[in-house]
Image: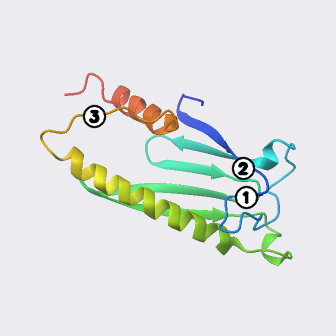
Amino acid sequence: MIEGPFLGGYMEIKAPNESATMTGRACALPLGTLTPQDQHRAFYYALFPTMMLSLHPDYAVFYTVWPVAVTQSRVVCEWMVHPDAPAAAGYNIQDAEEFWDRTNRQDWHICEQSQLGISSRVYAPGPYSPRESIPAAWDRMYLRAFEGQS
């Protein structure tokens, strides 16, 4: 994991899967010339404080989070593929969109449940799972940004 003005890490795409899609198949052309290792990785970067970039071998997505109220945010997802991908055989970005729509809705539900707990006056933070290094690092960065401010 990388820490700095952004946080980053990667996820291995395990065979027989080629991509993070509902079918596990690549849904678009490769985004460039990738090393054999990077053909099986998705890279994630959280750009403090409101953006996440998700780079996959066959597509990229960036998410921006826009605060609407103290307990509400709007998330915008923008999808990018190789310029020639829509005309290529096998193009099926909906396969990735459905995968991430389901995954994100589950994550957002967890966030909503967490917000309810955090709102409680008896709330006490607990530890993150070792697999949640990016959210833990984001929390540390957030707290550093507000150190000394009252």
Please state the total of marks drawn on the protein image: 3
Q: Residues within 10 Å of mark 3 (few under 14, many from 20)?
A: few
- Residue type, numbered disc 2: Ile
Q: In the displayed structure, does residue 8 sit left or right of residue 12?
A: left
Residue 75's spot in the image, x, y percent?
43, 61
User: Which circle's residue, 2 or 3, is located before the other in the chain?
Assistant: 2
Instruction: Kindly report the distance in space between the C-alpha atoms of the residues bearing marks 2 and 3.
Output: 32 Å
Which numbered circle lies on residue 101?
none
Colour basis = rainbow
Q: In the displayed structure, does residue 101 sit left or right of residue 140?
A: right
Residue 52's spot in the image, x, y percent?
53, 49
Residue pictured at 54% horizontal, 28% vertical: 4
| C-beta proximity under 8 Å, tags 1 and 2 | yes
Residue pictured at 76% horizontal, 65% vertical: 25
Residue pictured at 24% horizontal, 27% vertical: 149
Q: Quadrant of residue 143?
A: top left
Q: Residues within 10 Å of mark 1 (few under 14, many from 20)?
A: many
Q: Is residue 30 above or below residue 35?
A: below
User: Which circle's residue, 1 or 3, is located before the other in the chain?
Assistant: 1
Instruction: Kindly report the distance in space between the C-alpha atoms of the residues bearing marks 1 and 2.
Output: 6 Å
- Relative to the observer, which residue lies in front, 115 or 87? 115
Quadrant for the N terminus in the image: top right
Q: Which residue is mark 2?
A: 13
Of all residues, the one furthest to the left in this rendering is: 121
- Residue type, numbered disc 1: Ser
User: Which circle's residue, 1 or 2, is located before the other in the chain?
Assistant: 2
Q: Which residue is mark 3?
A: 125
Label 3's element? Answer: loop
- Relative to the observer, which residue lies in front, 71 or 42? 42
Q: Which residue is mark 1?
A: 19
- Relative to the observer, which residue lies in front, 28 or 130? 130
